[in-house]
Image (tube, rainbow, N blue to C red):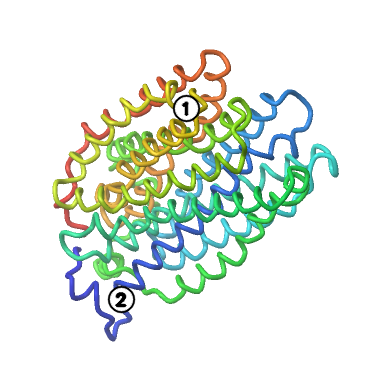
Amino acid sequence: MSTSPISAAQPNAAGQTSSARIIFASFIGTAIEFYDFYVYATAAALVIGPVFFPHGSATAQALSAFVTFGIAFVARPIGSFLFGHFGDRIGRKSTLVASLLVMGVSTTLIGFVPGYDSIGSLAPILLCVLRFGQGIGLGGEWGGAALLATENAPAGKRGWFGMFPQLGPSIGFLASNGLFFALALSLSDEQFRSWGWRVPFLVSAVLVALGLYVRLKIAETPAFQAAIERKERVKVPIATLFSQHGLPTLLGALAMVVCYTLFYNATTFSLSYGVSVLHIPRPTFLGMLCIAVVFMALATPLSAWASDRYGRKPVLIVGIIAAILSGFTMAPLLGSGQTPLVLLFLVIELFLMGVTFAPMGALLPELFPTNVRYTGAGVSYNLGGILGASVAPYIAQVLAAHGGLPWVGAYVSIAAAVSMIGVLCMRETRDSQLM
């Protein structure tokens, strides 16, 4: 059921959590989770290839690194099935704590894995196992964080409340990229490849401890408590989801494709291409990404506010049209190799990522009833990741090698068109009740 502004904002004897704590708990968890994920994405673009796949050309190393990057996106739907089951059966709070632990432990352990020169082929095997663990954890994270925010939101403000988990990626990326940027400035290339790249992975342990402290302080959401009282929980949420809500799941996944493609082509692929092909210094490119992601953070609340005022679909349609057009800017801007133009390209892509990503915090939960909402939102979100992100840097690398940046730009435009189909086919959800 929908939550009144009073019940969402004030603590009560039943253990209701204040709005400030809800917002912070939904935000801090996704910020930490995405910090963990982006640490790997940045490392994949910079050092994973030489450290774990030293034999072969630079292109072969990059492709191998991006394959390990994609493994987590295969694991994420599995994580959404697993954590979604317990989130819809046991509750949002305990499941969110478990997903954070899985993600954090996997990330921290990556920082301890020896390179290929030390333990041979066991090194990439261990890396892949831990990368899979990262994906499992993140697969259960986002859906729970979005539900924590939206199921506690006052009437008419679900888009705004659902925006706070969507801010987590911007902050997580800034923290990750900022740390790599500082390391690039303070260490030599040899020091960075020897041990410096491991530091951001180890820092994750401290951040996870903070996230656990915050999440252990929150109460269960009113919508889930009401579902328990009405005895509406189902035994196997994933079976109910696919048998009764298959179309919304598919449409939600298609809608997410544009977000993933914009982000990972503007960051992981562009970083690799900019440093290795355009020969832009690593600190310079990392600095540009830090600037560009600020625009993503600024676009997020603007888009969320607009989605509450005008609806989820109109905002997404405008953003996706702009994303389709942005594909044509990749070759002239990024390909120029000129710092101002490259920065402009990164700003455009990440701003549009914020525009299209922000409404998803409310839209995906609104597509499903309470008894399968955790599973449904998470599965849609992470299936979209397989389509839009798992292979995005790899495909972009192959297209760039064979056809150049115009082909990569066309890929971005086509991915955005796929999302347009999903959005046009779905219903408007702004006025739906979370029952």
- Residue furthest to the bottom in view is 13
Q: Amino acid at mark 2?
A: Ser
Q: Amino acid at mark 1?
A: Leu
Question: Residue 344 falls in which quadrant of the image?
Answer: top left
Q: Residues within 10 Å of mark 2 (few under 14, many from 20)?
A: some
Q: Earlier in the sequence, mark 2 or mark 1?
A: 2
Which mark is drawn over residue 334? 1
- Residue 264 left/right relative to 105: left
Tell me where residue 205 appears, x and y as whole percent. 62, 64
Tell me where residue 140 appears, x and y as whole percent. 46, 54
Residue at image coords 54%, 47%: 38
- Residue 32 left/right relative to 186: left
Which mark is drawn over residue 238? none
Identify whether 133 is placed above or below 414.
below
Which SS class for mark 1? helix
Which mark is drawn over residue 18? 2
Question: Residue 215 falls in which quadrant of the image?
Answer: bottom left
Residue at image coords 31%, 68%: 221
Identify whether 72 is placed above or below 106.
above
Question: If the image is split into quadrants, where does the N terminus sit?
Answer: bottom left
Residue at image coords 53%, 38%: 74
Q: Looking at the image, do the residues carrying marks 2 and 1 touch, with CB atoms under 8 Å apart?
A: no
Which SS class for mark 2? loop
